[in-house]
Each structure stands twice: as C-alpha cells, then as structure tokens.
Amino acid sequence: EIIMTQSPATLSVSPGERATLSCRASQSVNSNLAWYQQKPGQSPRLLIYGASARASGIPARFSGSGSGTEFTLTISSVQPEDVALYHCQQYRNWPPYTFGQGTKLEIK
Amino acid sequence: QVQLQESGPGLVRPSETLSLTCSVSGDITNAHYWTWIRQSPGTGLEWIGYISYSGSTEYNPSLKSRVTISIDTSKNQFSLRLSSVTAADRAVYYCARQKGPLDVWGKGTTVTVSS
C-alpha cells in the first residue's frame, strides 16, 4: 500500500497571499496524483488530476506540480472561499487507492 | 451532468450489516468505476472499493472480508454491504464516480454504529 503524507496539517494564510500545500508518496506514483477540496459540511471536489491538470470549472489560481513522490498544490492568491480541507490521492497502485490525511487551510 | 445520491439507514447495530445504495442520475457507463469511500473523524478518506458496469469489483484489502459491492444497471444504482460492523465503522459514507481520480461525488450519508 502506498502511504500518502500531507504537510502541514494546518496552514493559516492571509487573503491574497500564496498558499503552498505538500503531498509526499511512500513510493513513486508517477503523475497519478489528484487533489480534492472539501469545504465544511460538503463532499470533496476534484481540483487537480494528473498532478497538474485542473478539473472542469476550477479557478486558475489553483495549480498542481510534481511527479514521482513529491507534489505541491499552490493557491496563488487565497480567497476567503478557499477555506477547506485539502486531500491528495494516488491512483498509480491499487487496491487500495490511498489518500493523505489532509491539510486544513485557514484564513488569518 | 451526473449526480449521485446515497441512501440507507443512519444507525446500525454492532455486529450487523450496513447497507447503503447510491442512485445515479444519468447513465451508469462502462467508462467509469462506481466507488464507495468513507470518512471517519480524524482518519481522513478511506477507499472502500469499486464496481464496474460489468460487475467486476476491487476492494480495499483491509475491508475485503466484510465488503460486498453490487450494481443494478437497470435501476442506475449500486450498493454497499459491510458486515459485522463495529464502532470503528462509524463514518460518513460517500459514493463516487471514478476513473483514477474521483470526479463526481455524492453528498454523503452519516452512519452511526450503536446498540
């Protein structure tokens, strides 16, 4: 099973600032990495797939990068509506597909 | 625009079987897998398993002995059964459409395990 580790657990950012979220895989997943946004009380929403491709309707301020074992989700200019729990997921090796523990984004 | 909706009892007794159904508005196609995920407080998202249009399944090895996922394409539904539940199975259960990444999710349903 591939273990996904996200950091930090909580990130506090002022509106308009850049947020950088990290995800590390215990072995290479190539570019088979997705990011999800989960707002309070809602189900997760796909943000990024293939490590760097934005899903339909996702604002351009969200970008993903990385390959192999190290990945980054960047929010270029954080907005108040970006407060959420962010998850990464690998889909290189299964079963099982595995998720990170999540990073909680807060607004200062 | 495909939408998914979970349904089923919100309360299950310990040692009994949890049964949930996911209703799909739009067609269940053979281009995707139809998946169950759960989320327990403090433990993140856990992939339970998926079923294809043709009925082939894959399960999380940690749950495999207790999980059955089935599909009824005539009703545009797929279902989850989890046997011998304990308090550790208390979670929000989501159904989702999957092709690697999970691109459509249901709203989720909360299941509590208690006598």
Image (tube, coloured by chain):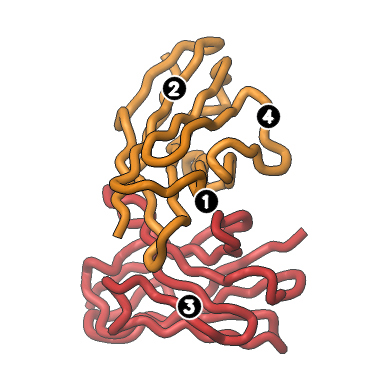
Chain colours: A orange, B red
Labels 1, 4: one chain:
yes
Residue wearing tag 1: A43
The answer to whether residue A62 is above or below residue B54 is: above
Label 4 environment density (alpha carbons within 10 Å; few <14, some 14–19, many ≥20):
few
- The residue lying at 36 percent from left, 74 percent from top is B11
Q: Which residue is mark 3?
A: B20
At label 1, the amino acid type is: Ser
| Front label number (1 vs 4) | 4
Q: CA distance from mark 4 to mark 3?
A: 34 Å
Q: Residue B77, how many percent across, how many down?
A: 63, 80
Q: Secondary structure at mark 4?
A: loop
**Element class at badge 3:** strand
Closer-to-camera residue (B12/B92): B92
State whether residue A103 is above or below residue A46.
above
Q: Residue at x 49, y 30 (%)?
A: A73
Give the percent coordinates (x, y) of residue B98: 58, 63
Circle 1 or circle 2, nearest the eye: 2
Quadrant in the picture for residue A105 = top left
Classify mark 3: residues with Cα within 10 Å, few (<14), some (14-19) or many (20+). many
Q: Chain of mark 1?
A: A
Q: Are the residues tagged 3 and 2 within 8 Å (C-beta)?
A: no
Kind of element beneath mark 2: strand
Instruction: Give me the residue at 31% from left, 28% from top.
Output: A8
Residue type at tag 3: Leu
- Residue holding disc 2: A20
Give residue A40's position: percent from left, percent from top. 47, 40
Q: Is residue A100 left or right of residue B36?
A: left
Q: Is residue A10 left or right of residue A80?
A: left
Give the Cα distance between marks 2 and 4: 16 Å
In the rendered structure, find residue A59 and report the number of the disc placed on it: 4
Q: Report how far apart the C-alphas of labels 3 and 2 lie in the structure.
A: 37 Å
